Image: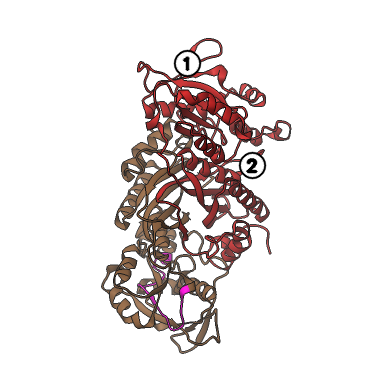
Chain colours: A brown, B red
Amino acid sequence: MNDLIMLGHGGGGRLTTDLVHNLFLKHFRNAALEPLNDSALLTMAQKNLAFTTDSYVVSPIFFPGGNIGSLAVHGTVNDLAMSGARPLYLSAAYIIEEGFSLGQLEEIVKAMAAAAAAAGVRIVTGDTKVVPKGMADGLYINTAGIGIHQNTPLGPQRIEKGDAILVNGTIGDHGAAVITAREAGFAQRRIISDAASLTHLVEKMRKNSIELHCLRDATRGGIGGILAELAEQAHSHLLIEEKAIPVREDVRGFAEIYGLDPLFLANEGKMLIFCAATDAEKTLQLLRSDPLGKNAAIIGRVKDSDSAAGQVILNTVIGGERIIDQPTGDLVPRIC
Amino acid sequence: MNDLIMLGHGGGGRLTTDLVHNLFLKHFRNAALEPLNDSALLTMAQKNLAFTTDSYVVSPIFFPGGNIGSLAVHGTVNDLAMSGARPLYLSAAYIIEEGFSLGQLEEIVKAMAAAAAAAGVRIVTGDTKVVPKGMADGLYINTAGIGIHQNTPLGPQRIEKGDAILVNGTIGDHGAAVITAREAGFAQRRIISDAASLTHLVEKMRKNSIELHCLRDATRGGIGGILAELAEQAHSHLLIEEKAIPVREDVRGFAEIYGLDPLFLANEGKMLIFCAATDAEKTLQLLRSDPLGKNAAIIGRVKDSDSAAGQVILNTVIGGERIIDQPTGDLVPRIC
């Protein structure tokens, strides 16, 4: 048997059936997936659902700290967790370029299975399409996710004046990792992505009765872009202290060389946390007690004044003020 | 403003926000989508869910009878309906090639909105990625869907000896339409796809208390491929009468010229129906009273004998017998 993906693997015939059994079912096996019917049948513990989707087109497909498969699990799990939902089920749909390596595909599928197990979710339904050579860039993956939420939903509509703003660790790691992995000097300058599922960290805050108002994973656009978006959605005036923002030394060095601002570099395991000011210190300690939050920091607050509603003001390390706006387009394409 | 998609439209910044507001929200607007948070929050009427996903890579993107957008709605809605579920919510995720026409994208989004309205589903969450020129073929769309099911789930495990096998109309229309649309003679030979949502037709059968056992939309692989798959899954011996299978004249002519078998041509608005033999005539009349079933036919039955369990035998028009097996790969790539 050929060890490359052929057009027929997406044709819905024998080759597709074999691929589904020998690859996807083998690694994802669970009771809901196993019947391999048109839909997975699920019984939910309750009726309030969160539903989300993301397509992943990251280049390169493998990068230090993960690959497109683990990213496709972490990213969608995090989108559910950010709404305050507990992620339960994922779909996985593959668009594969003809000639893609079956071995690499299996490595990616294994990474998805491991990421799903770690996040406590099951992959219950899927799809495989193959496009001719030159019609994709190796592999694109879509995941959609379903979670349940029992609490009041979180979101920008709940941001209040006085709220503390935290981040659970160093920023820009994923963006720096992916860009570095594209370069020739990859072997020398190995920056590790922060890609991770944040669901346990969110549950930890919930269990400790932190008065959470809004969570947002700072993916495309980085914390700068996301803060600008949230300020606009919440009509809030956000004040951020640049010196409080944790940035890893290797990421800072990378950003300086490339002339990029870590504020706008993508993260895949970092979230912005808006909570009641009275809970700020407790939240910080809680985050720091977890491996995914050990470099957490309080980076700012929602100002009481309405003078600059909808704006993000950064107090810079050199003592100035800077308005943080949403970037127009991409700093870097295909970061996730 | 440029009327072509730029990389920045997928960057998560201002251009993405504008695209989401001015295109997706404009046409899909509903209460669950509108907050534009990481996840859509949904309250389900009950706890038994069906969940499915499909990526659509059809070429050409526009074909007689539909486009990639309407197909992405019909296809996923049908996957839910085939499980006996009532489709309720869809996600929509776009992978767009840089340089794709914004006007065409709007036409596709409008077709999705119309198809969703017709099927009674809402598009509640989404994602947009843009890949550089040459890294896709215009546009790929993924939809995932959620439905609720109250009845015993349908599926091959419920197929019984003696069951009648019906199809709700002419076969091969979609495959013939897409292949014809790829050819130069497109303007002359205009074969119309059957792409449609089957959810109303399924509900009609439910309401009339038809004893349904298994439904399957005959997409990739055609009714031949799907029958072979079902026979295997159900360990059943299926007997099909070739002369009973409805085929449109233009599709039959097309298939003869290209040397293709309509049995294996894709459908996007046709399903195979397995029901109790005693309900066969009632089902037929019910289907025929609906525009989507006006050419419905009883095409075969599940044999009582175990002599050929797992096999599909076709009684051919010329009086012979032929074993119908799953095709190995693709008859035609990128049919959906």
Q: Residues within 10 Å of mark 2 (few under 14, many from 20)?
A: many
Q: Is residue A161 magenta?
A: yes
Q: Amino acid at mark 2?
A: Gly
Q: CA distance from mark 2 to mark 1?
A: 34 Å
**Viewer can see residue A185:** no
Image coords of residue A21 (percent x, y): 35, 37
Image coords of residue B320 (percent x, y): 50, 11
Question: Image quadrant of residue B199?
Answer: top right
Q: Is residue A97 magenta?
A: no
Report the number of discs. Answer: 2
**Viewer can see residue B203:** yes
**Label 1 residue SS:** strand
**Label 2 residue SS:** strand
Give the camera-side residue of B332 and B24. Answer: B24
The residue range painted magenta reads A158-176
Indicate the chain on which mark 1 is placed. B
Indicate the chain on which mark 2 is placed. B
Image coords of residue B308 (percent x, y): 37, 18
Q: Earlier in the sequence, mark 2 or mark 1?
A: 2
- In this view, the residue farthest toward the front is B208
Q: Residues within 10 Å of mark 1 (few under 14, many from 20)?
A: few
Q: Residue at x 52, y 26 (%)?
A: B166
Image quarter where the C terminus of chain B lies is: top right
Give the camera-side residue of B164 and A174. Answer: B164
